[in-house]
Image (spheres, rainbow, N blue to C red):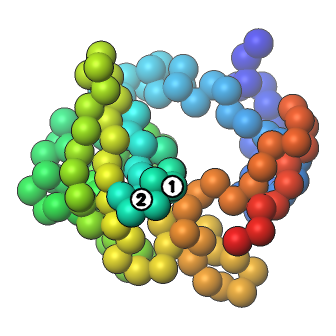
């Protein structure tokens, strides 16, 4: 089933809502657009918490290793993205690991500021990671306390 006919949800509905709108077509779209990337799991090196999932191309990985700070490739903006360059929420690199099939990476990082997610709590405080809602079913999400 194609997700391309689905209307785009408003950003607030997508990022703050409680209706599940999971984008099962994301990886397929990345392939159709010709991006040469691998998925990157960004994990807090001290707690083990997964902060978010991103993508890296060869240049993003090279810059990550050189800068010792998380650099990714934005598949929606088609550009290199130094995490936190504008928000101040940079992620210092502890190490990079590769999986057995060499088709995904793990960036173990430490948060240099309050958060890792581009969204904020209603108070304006940075969220520590992007996994701030639980899935209740195929159509419903619930906010997690945090």
Crowding at dot 2, Cα within 10 Å, few <14 / some 14-19 / many 20+, comes out as many
Secondary structure of the residue carrying numbered label 2: strand
From the top left corner, tell me how far across and down residue 84 is, in percent. 37, 70
From the top left corner, tell me how far across and down residue 81 is, in percent. 33, 56
Q: Is residue 73 above or below residue 132?
A: above
Crowding at dot 1, Cα within 10 Å, few <14 / some 14-19 / many 20+, comes out as some
- In the picture, the quarter occupied by the C terminus is bottom right
Q: Residue furthest front?
A: 47
Residue at 80% across / 43% down in the picture?
135
Secondary structure of the residue carrying numbered label 1: loop
Residue at 19% across / 36% down in the picture?
58
Of pointers 2 and 1, the one earlier in the residue sequence: 2
* Mark 2 in CB contact with mark 1 (< 8 angstroms): yes
Is residue 66 shown left or right of residue 53? left
- What numbered label is drawn on residue 13? none
Q: Is residue 21 above or below residue 52?
A: above
Residue at 69% across / 77% down in the picture?
121
From the top left corner, tell me how far across and down residue 38 is, in percent. 34, 30
Is residue 58 shown left or right of residue 128? left
* Residue 78 visible in rendering: no
* Residue 45 visible in rendering: yes
Q: Nearer the viewer, residue 10 or 72?
A: 72
- Cα separation, mark 2 vs mark 1, equals 5 Å
Q: Is residue 72 above or below residue 130?
A: above
Is residue 51 shown left or right of residue 135? left
Q: Nearer the viewer, residue 136 or 32?
A: 136
> Which residue position holds label 2?
44
Q: Residue furthest top?
A: 1
> Which residue position holds label 1?
49
């Amino acid at each position: 089933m194609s997700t391309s006919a689905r209307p785009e949800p408003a950003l607030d509905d997508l990022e703050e809502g409680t209706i599940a709108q999971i984008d099962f077509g994301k990886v397929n779209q990345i392939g159709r657009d010709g991006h040469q990337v691998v998925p990157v799991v960004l994990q807090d090196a001290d707690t083990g918490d997964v902060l978010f999932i991103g993508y890296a191309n060869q240049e993003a990985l090279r810059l990550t290793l050189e800068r010792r700070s998380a650099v990714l490739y934005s598949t929606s903006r088609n550009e290199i993205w130094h995490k936190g360059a504008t928000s101040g929420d940079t992620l210092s690199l502890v190490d990079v690991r590769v999986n057995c099939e060499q088709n995904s990476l793990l960036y173990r990082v430490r948060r240099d500021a309050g958060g890792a997610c581009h969204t904020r709590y209603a108070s304006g405080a940075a969220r520590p990671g992007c996994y701030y809602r639980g899935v209740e079913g195929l159509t419903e999400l619930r906010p997690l306390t945090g």
